[in-house]
Image (cartoon, rainbow, N blue to C red):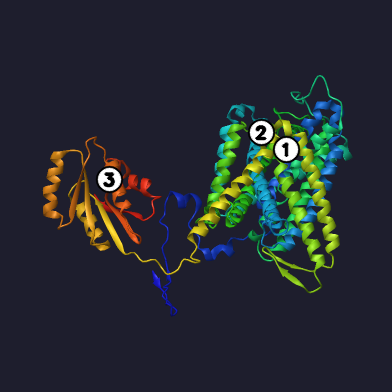
Amino acid sequence: MNLEDRNGTTVVRRVGDYKTKPSVRTWLIGRPLRTADSDQQTIGKFIGLAVFSSDAMSSVAYAPQEMLIVLAAAGTAGLGYSIPLAIAIVILLAILTLSYEQTIHTYTNGGGAYIVSRDNLGEYPAMIAAAALLTDYILTVAVSISSGVAQIVSAAPAFEAYRVPIAVAMVVFIMVVNLRGIKESGSAFAIPSYFFVLMMFLTVGVGFFRFLVTGTLGQVANPPQDLMHDVVQPVTIFLILKAFSSGTTALTGVEAISNGITAFKEPRSKNAGITLIMMACILGSLMLGITFLSHQVGALPSEEETVISQLARTVFGDRGFIYLATIVSTTVILMMAANTAFAGFPWLAALTAGDGYLPRQLTYRGSRLVYSRGIAMLAGAAILLIILFSANVTRLIPLYAIGVFLSFTLSQSGMAYRWYKSGKLKPGEEKQERGSVLHHDPHWLTKMIINGVGALVTFVVMMVFAITKFATGAYIVIILIPLLVGLFLAIHRHYQSVAKRLSLDHFGAPPHIARNRVILAVSGVHRGTMAALRYARTLSDDITAVHVSIDPVEADKLKTKWETWGDGIRLVILESPYRLLIEPLLAYIDDIDEKRQPNEVITVVVPQFVTPNIMTSILHMRTADALRNVLLNRPGIVINEVPYQVE
């Protein structure tokens, strides 16, 4: 330990040089990092695209398929609507990109929809945004991992029976990698992410070449027919809106960059903004290309074989090496999509916990400077969903995207109101807000219109999604979000109540303890008892040893030994005719407590054997633990455990 100066105060600062010893944990997640190393854990645009954009980019692996699944109800005629719907989704993507570009440059410390809503719309909208995004992050992991498993099953149907175990193993793997830190997880996942982008553009490029230049693209050989209906439904507005809502799952993850701005290197806002635009360009072009080519080759949505698999084997002519590379890259990027949630969920949970709406433990960084508890919480919740829904993408999709579009709406509404407030300020005037500095912006009206349009469009999409998917599972999320908000409020009220009880305002002078009455629990007279007695003497001269007697012969032996070793301390023997140990002792403490005066403390001292391993520790009574559980909520009573090491 290095002792520093007092700086003229009663406070002494000491700098510890303790280092964690090598263990399985350090081998698994890496050596601990110093707090001062946090600046070195930031990432650039290249890694940032892999970390925060993989969710959005990977959605092209399942969003077109989920859109086609709905359109398949109207037969081949319905499938033709996929192209105009894809165009509409890309237009919506452009609106969101422009909107979040403004958010990134305004709220440079990140936080996304939660911070924007908190600062501009108030407490309840902020909690709704937090609940919606946290729910969406959990569903992102469950959906993307389940979709990745679907790609594996498409290439190797023999693994169908092992969908759930494979998915759970994937979640655990990504959790461990993220516990190693955002920089390491980003570096580990960058190559697979860019490999996916390369393979998708190769598939789309070769497909367009064969379609436009050589005219040899052809149709899918032996397409699956399990979702095609003998009796087709008519093409209705409701059907089209339902398909559109399924396709908009491609836009989930767009907000992730705005949530994690602080993970980027300086200049953070500039790097985050460029990354957002790069992501939008990749996502939009792939969404249009895959949807168009899937329609041209006659790919049919199926649980047996994904649309990506059908497109790849048609474009490349067989299930050869390039096809397998495409499927492998798709599977891996879907795992990386879960990584985006692992980057966003812990950060948002920490922000929410910092404001007192979630347990404070979520604000503490682990040994690798990441929010370890948030990472573990996300993994546990996602695994539970995967098990409950059998890793089935189609069953999980109805739960998906409502939360994220709700957060989109709140974020854009908050930004629109912020620009309105900005327009009310005079040029050069500034106003400090909780998450940023508000100043007059000469372009406030244009920016307000952009965010206002974004809010309106995302609200409409959210309502479409909620209505069209309500009966197939969306009602779960619609019910869950208000329940989470209620939980946030309950946690917040608890923290406020505790803060009020602990406040030193109007507390007066520091309290003075007039008397400390010590009760020494004695099961026998031995070295452990003597150690506890020596400790008790340091607390007070008012000491009473108490022994619960269930065997008169043993009690007499203890009395004789106490007269020799008790050093004049009084001993009270409590007769227990029903052979109870804890209850008579508690009754005695209750009797003393009833007579306790103000500014008087009762300290219960319990000798405790400490053995070298767990197996031998269960051979001894844990009296202190039992007393602590009972007396913990009793004011004025302190439980002290005096360990005595037994080799």
Q: Are marks 3 and 1 in contact (CB under 8 Å)?
A: no
Q: Position of residue 19 (x, y in %)?
A: 42, 61
Please, what secondary structure does the residue beneath circle 3 have?
helix
Nearer the observer, disc 3 or disc 2?
3
Asked if residue 351 lies left or right of residue 599, the reply is right
Asked if residue 21 lies left or right of residue 115, the reply is left
Residue flagged by tag 2: what amino acid is it?
Ala
Nearer the observer, disc 3 or disc 1?
3
Please, what secondary structure does the residue beneath circle 1 have?
loop
The numbered mark, 3 or 2, whose residue comes first in the sequence reads 2
Which disc is residue 150 wearing?
2
Q: Are marks 2 and 1 in contact (CB under 8 Å)?
A: yes
Residue at 55% from the left image edge and 43% from the top image edge: 173
Q: Position of residue 274 (x, y in %)?
A: 75, 59
Q: What is the C-alpha distance between the residues marked 3 and 2? A: 62 Å
Which disc is residue 62 wearing?
1
For the residue carrying disc 3, how many other residues have a C-alpha within 10 Å: few (<14), some (14-19), or many (20+)? many
Q: Is residue 234 above or below residue 519?
A: above
Residue flagged by tag 1: what amino acid is it?
Tyr
Residue at numbered disc 3: 585
Q: Please name whichever residue, 545 or 189, is drawn nearer the observer in this view of the structure.
A: 545
Which quadrant of the view contains residue 307? top right
Q: Position of residue 520 (x, y in %)?
A: 24, 52
Please, what secondary structure does the residue beneath circle 2 have?
helix
Residue at 69% from the left image edge and 40% from the top image edge: 330
Q: Position of residue 523 (x, y in %)?
A: 22, 46
Residue flagged by tag 3: what amino acid is it?
Leu
